[in-house]
Image (spheres, grey):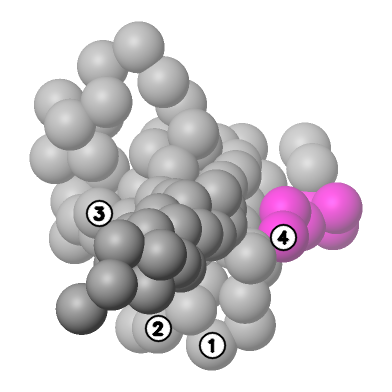
Amino acid sequence: MSSSLFGRIVVAVALVLAAGTTGAAAAPLTPFRYEAQAQRHCPGDKVVWLDFRKGIYYAKGQKRYGQGFDGSFVCLSEVRGSSYRRSLLGLR
């Protein structure tokens, strides 16, 4: 193999690897069944209720916080980095 062809292959591989690392990867969510479990996982953060079916999360004090079968408690910092949106309704 000639050195110029080898050089091109090295450059192509480097570009592919660099392109793969620049994409923003979503942070994984760690869902919990109980609020206390989520609070132990992220002690310096707020815990929210994430409704998977609706794609919405609720803060403590909102009407639907902790309700429903299609949800879990998660850390606010984790859910903000995902595609879920916060609920604007039900603030008390």
Q: Residue at x 28, y 72 (%)?
A: 2
Residues tagged 3 and 1 counted as in contact (Cβ below 8 A): no
Q: Residue at x 55, y 49 (%)?
A: 22
Pointer 3: what residue?
30
| Mark 3 neighbour class, 10 Å CA radius: few under 14, some 14 to 19, many 20 or more | few
Pointer 2: what residue?
70
Q: Position of residue 25 (x, y in %)?
A: 47, 57
The answer for how far apart the CA atoms under marks 1 and 2 are is 6 Å
Which of the pair 67/4 is nearer the observer? 4
Comparing labels 3 and 1, the label whose residue is closer to the camera: 3
Secondary structure, mark 2, is: loop
Q: Which numbered circle lies on residue 5?
A: none
Pointer 1: what residue?
53
Q: Position of residue 77 (x, y in %)?
A: 49, 34
Which of the pair 54/79 is nearer the observer? 79
Residues tagged 1 and 2 counted as in contact (Cβ below 8 A): yes
The answer for how far apart the CA atoms under marks 4 and 3 are is 17 Å
Q: Position of residue 79 (x, y in %)?
A: 51, 50
Tell me which amino acid carries mark 3. Thr
Q: Earlier in the sequence, mark 4 or mark 1?
A: 1
Residue 47 visible in the shown view:
yes
Name the residue at the right extreme: 88
Pointer 4: what residue?
85
Q: Earlier in the sequence, mark 2 or mark 3?
A: 3
